[in-house]
């Protein structure tokens, strides 16, 4: 019967159906037959899926026999029709639609259709918890993709099914925190998957106590990338959390100088009056040769504004560094410190003639910032 509806009913409709007429036909109060005709029309014509029509469909009463139509459309030869059908199933928010979408993720050959199904489950998961285990499985999918060296800057790219699952779980919010924590703590999972789980936990507004507890535990993980991401994530902890601060203080003794520097910045985010962060960063500028660690230390000092004024004597010589990335970071940090960095104006004026255009431009901006804040 469903196949007959898919094939026969659209033939009785005009090839072009205006958004206005579509919306009118799908308005509440009209007969179920009209609703079915609209669904069938969309699933038979890929061009029919405009935003206006999807909004009209969202207002329909989606009974099981209408879901039958969407199930058939989710198996269509045209991937665009399958994607639209999957999107509409995400509006149904029923256990049956969860099962259908799970099967799409498992069996469909198109990664884009799979991603659409994952996204729909993210919408459903706000209502039905049965979507969460399926998304966790998609997150742990063994799909291969390259890891970036600086994963803290990666965010959610949605390049893979794993990324899409992390985004969907993040949308679900509190109900996904427990399962995400389990993945983050599971050392049998690939580090890249664990990192995505941490990111999903981080971006659920402020950290919930269970998420915070998970991140604190991860600050001692054997994987340095995991420890780093956990320290970054704790920046979203409650500023009054003693346990979070203890976890960050522990990270100040990490074997990685870079993580120590990031921990100093995170500690300042939670407690701007602490007397530990600035000395730690100054220490690394004096002792660490690694370029990225030095850059991060300078950048963190800049973020602290006038709270890092004690570091001005250390920052001024760095404006003449042989590395342009260090010169640029130092110039910007001095500008962010503000009026207390007035002593740096002569060296910043010198930097206005720097061979690196970016350094020269930011030197001029920093002078203005220092003078503006008087």
Image (cartoon, rainbow, N blue to C red):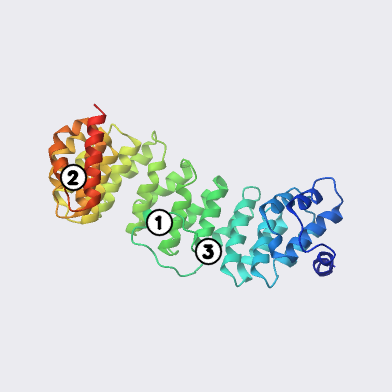
- Expressed as whole percent of the image width and height from the top left, the position of residue 41 reads 77, 62
- Is 301 on the left or on the right of 208, as rendered? left
Q: CA distance from mark 1 to mark 3?
A: 15 Å
Label 3–label 2 contact, CB within 8 A:
no
- Mark 3: give few (<14), some (14-19) or many (20+) Cα within 10 Å: many
First reached walking from the N terminus: tag 3 or tag 2: 3
Q: Which residue is mark 1?
A: 154
Q: CA distance from mark 3 to mark 2?
A: 47 Å
First reached walking from the N terminus: tag 1 or tag 3: 1
**Is residue 275 at least partly visible in the picture?**
no
User: What is the secondary structure assignment of the residue under circle 3?
Assistant: helix
User: What is the secondary structure assignment of the residue under circle 2?
Assistant: loop
- Is 218 on the left or on the right of 75, as rendered? left
Label 1–label 3 contact, CB within 8 A:
no
Residue 29, picture quadrant? top right
- Is 183 on the left or on the right of 295, as rendered? right
Q: Which residue is mark 3?
A: 161
User: What is the secondary structure assignment of the residue under circle 1?
Assistant: loop
Residue at point 84% right, 65% down?
9
Residue at point 81% right, 51% down?
25
Label 2–label 1 contact, CB within 8 A:
no
């Amino acid at each position: 019967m469903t196949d007959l509806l898919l094939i026969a009913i659209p033939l009785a409709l005009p090839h072009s159906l205006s958004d206005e007429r579509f919306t009118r036909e799908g308005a509440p109060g009209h007969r179920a037959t009209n609703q079915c005709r609209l669904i069938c029309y969309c699933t038979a014509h890929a061009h029919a899926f405009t935003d206006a029509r999807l909004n009209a469909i969202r207002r329909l009463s989606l009974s099981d026999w209408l879901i039958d139509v969407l199930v058939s459309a989710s198996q269509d030869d045209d991937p665009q029709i399958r994607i639209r059908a999957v999107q509409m199933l995400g509006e149904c928010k029923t256990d049956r639609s969860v099962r259908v979408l799970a099967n799409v993720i498992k069996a469909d050959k198109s990664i884009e259709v799979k991603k659409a199904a994952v996204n729909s489950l993210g919408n459903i998961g706000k209502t039905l918890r049965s979507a969460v285990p399926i998304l966790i499985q998609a997150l742990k999918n063994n799909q291969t993709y390259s890891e970036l060296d600086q994963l803290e800057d990666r965010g959610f790219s949605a390049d893979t099914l794993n990324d899409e699952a992390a985004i969907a779980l993040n949308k679900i919010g509190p109900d996904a925190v427990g399962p995400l924590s389990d993945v983050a703590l599971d050392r049998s999972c690939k580090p890249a998957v664990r990192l995505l789980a941490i990111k999903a936990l981080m971006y659920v507004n402020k950290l919930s106590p269970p998420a915070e507890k998970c991140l604190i535990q991860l600050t001692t993980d054997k994987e340095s990338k995991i420890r780093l991401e956990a320290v970054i994530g704790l920046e979203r902890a409650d500023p009054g959390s003693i346990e979070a601060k203890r976890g960050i203080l522990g990270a100040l003794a990490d074997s990685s100088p870079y993580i120590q520097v990031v921990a100093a910045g995170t500690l300042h985010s939670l407690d701007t009056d602490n007397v530990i962060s600035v000395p730690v960063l100054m220490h690394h500028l004096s002792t660490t040769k690694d370029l990225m660690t030095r850059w991060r230390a300078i950048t963190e000092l800049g973020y602290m504004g006038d709270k890092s004024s004690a570091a001005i004597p250390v920052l001024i010589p760095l404006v003449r560094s042989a590395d342009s990335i260090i010169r640029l970071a130092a110039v910007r940090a001095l500008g962010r410190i503000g009026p207390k960095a007035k002593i740096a104006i002569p060296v910043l004026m010198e930097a206005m003639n720097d061979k690196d255009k970016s350094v020269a431009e930011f030197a001029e901006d920093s002078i203005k910032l220092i003078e503006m804040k008087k």
